[in-house]
Image (cartoon, rainbow, N blue to C red):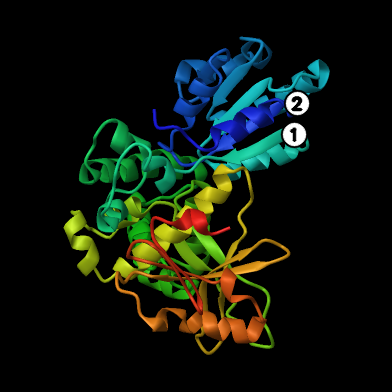
């Protein structure tokens, strides 16, 4: 098993809260992590029909299966949450239940109704580059974008072209049917492909709906399904305007570039650097890595982008509350001074310090310049 950075936080919180929730996309490694982190717990999955029947017919007896339990895909039986609330309130124990699922909307809805204040919420994404690099030496950014980060690809040595089409089909047939009554699953898959073609772009719902041949409300609903099941995330615009009119639309990204590449019809790593979406996929990978770092530390998303009505833009703004860290992302392997032009514009507006300005590019190494810090794509840990 590739060590996961979230493990320490997971164990720590289980000693402070009666319930810990771990959500994340299918195949991100939740089950493996939970069984490895809590070997003394009884593990059960509500994906199994007989287990689900047992839990539905006799929830009290089911929840008494062991003094401490891991319940996977717990959102499949919403009634369990009220029983878990009663049991944990009566026992006063910490770490009594570890619950997990791959659909954040359903799970969070049940948590807010029954377990608010009693549960610590964590999110496990596919492997981060820092996790994967402890297991495998990857020098090719194209190969990394194409393969993506799902653990099973590396644990079982599965080719990306074999993994992702099956992953997409399984996801659509199981999660999409559970989350939303989609009549035409092929239309939904086409919608996902259109989203992949818009990765890194401002989200124009009307245009997306029109190209997909669905209503704006349907497009909005389908995007919610993709968000809830950790396929895509929306990067929100930063609110600070510096007397400039700002773009208010979010930008669309995928949690995993391997999944996005498959949806784009890319069939080998060799196609990546000449593909029309290469720059967007590279940007997507960097932003997803920054987000994974936050989530795997048990922290909330604090990433934004900034763009005014004239098109001046900063790819990522990390908002630490008392400081803002602007980051530009360039897929080119060759450094040029123009990399920092957007950051210099931002500095004049914001008055921020050069030492907190970063450009992440497709090359290697770290270099301090008069305009900020240039980082190769492997060096993201240098960004605070």
Q: What element carries label 1?
A: helix
Left or right placement of residue 63 versus residue 260 in this view: right
Nearer to the camera, 233 or 178: 233
Tell me the distance, in whole angstroms, between the alpha carbons under discs 2 and 1.
6 Å
Q: Can residue 25 be seen in this view?
A: yes
Label 2: how many residues lie within 10 Å, few (<14), some (14-19) or many (20+)? some
For marks 2 and 1, the one nearer the N-term is 2
Q: In which quarter of the image is residue 285?
A: bottom left
Q: Is residue 200 placed above or below 379 in the rendered structure?
A: below
- For label 2, the residue is 85
- For label 1, the residue is 114
Whether residues under marks 2 and 1 lie with C-beta atoms below 8 angstroms apart, the answer is yes
x, y (%) of residue 121?
A: 65, 39
For the point 51% across and 57% down, the residue is 382
Q: Is residue 54 placed above or below 89 in the rendered structure?
A: above
x, y (%) of residue 319?
A: 65, 64
For the point 27% across and 60% down, the residue is 264
Q: Is mark 2 on a helix, strand or loop?
A: helix
x, y (%) of residue 290?
A: 50, 56
Left or right placement of residue 232 versus residue 155 in this view: right
Q: Can residue 76 be seen in this view?
A: no
Nearer to the camera, 160 or 264: 160
């Amino acid at each position: 098993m590739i060590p996961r950075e979230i493990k320490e936080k997971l164990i720590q919180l289980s000693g402070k809260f009666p319930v810990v929730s771990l959500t994340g996309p299918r195949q991100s490694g939740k089950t493996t992590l939970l069984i490895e982190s809590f070997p003394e717990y009884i593990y059960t999955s509500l994906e199994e029909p007989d287990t689900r029947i047992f839990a539905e017919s006799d929830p009290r007896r089911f929840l008494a299966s062991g003094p401490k339990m891991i319940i996977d895909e717990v959102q499949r039986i919403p009634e369990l949450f009220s029983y878990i609330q009663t049991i944990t309130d009566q026992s006063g124990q910490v770490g009594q239940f570890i619950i997990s699922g791959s659909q954040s909307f359903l799970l969070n809805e049940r948590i807010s109704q029954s377990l608010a204040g009693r549960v610590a919420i964590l999110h496990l994404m596919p492997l981060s580059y820092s996790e994967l690099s402890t297991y495998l030496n990857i020098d090719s950014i194209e190969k990394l974008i194409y393969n993506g980060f799902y653990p099973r690809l590396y644990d079982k040595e599965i080719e990306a072209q074999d993994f992702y089409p099956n992953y997409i089909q399984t996801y659509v047939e199981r999660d999409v049917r559970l989350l939303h009554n989609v009549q035409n699953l092929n239309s939904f898959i086409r919608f996902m492909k259109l989203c992949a073609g818009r990765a890194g772009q401002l989200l124009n719902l009307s245009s997306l709906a029109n190209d997909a041949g669905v209503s704006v409300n349907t497009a909005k609903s389908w995007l919610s399904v993709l968000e809830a099941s950790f396929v895509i995330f929306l990067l929100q615009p930063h609110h600070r305007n510096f007397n400039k009119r700002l773009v208010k639309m979010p930008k669309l990204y995928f949690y995993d570039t391997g999944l996005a590449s498959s949806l784009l019809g890319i069939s080998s790593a060799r196609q990546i650097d000449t593909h029309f979406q290469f720059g967007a996929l590279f940007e997507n990978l960097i932003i997803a890595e920054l987000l994974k770092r936050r989530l795997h530390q048990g922290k909330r998303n604090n990433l934004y982008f900034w763009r005014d009505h004239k098109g001046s833009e900063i790819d990522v703004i990390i908002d630490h509350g008392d400081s803002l860290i602007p980051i530009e992302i360039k897929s080119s392997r060759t450094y040029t001074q123009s990399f920092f032009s957007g950051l210099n514009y931002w500095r004049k507006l914001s008055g921020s310090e050069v030492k907190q300005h970063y450009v992440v590019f497709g090359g290697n190494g770290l270099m301090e310049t008069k305009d900020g810090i240039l980082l190769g794509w492997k060096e993201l840990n240098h960004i605070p």
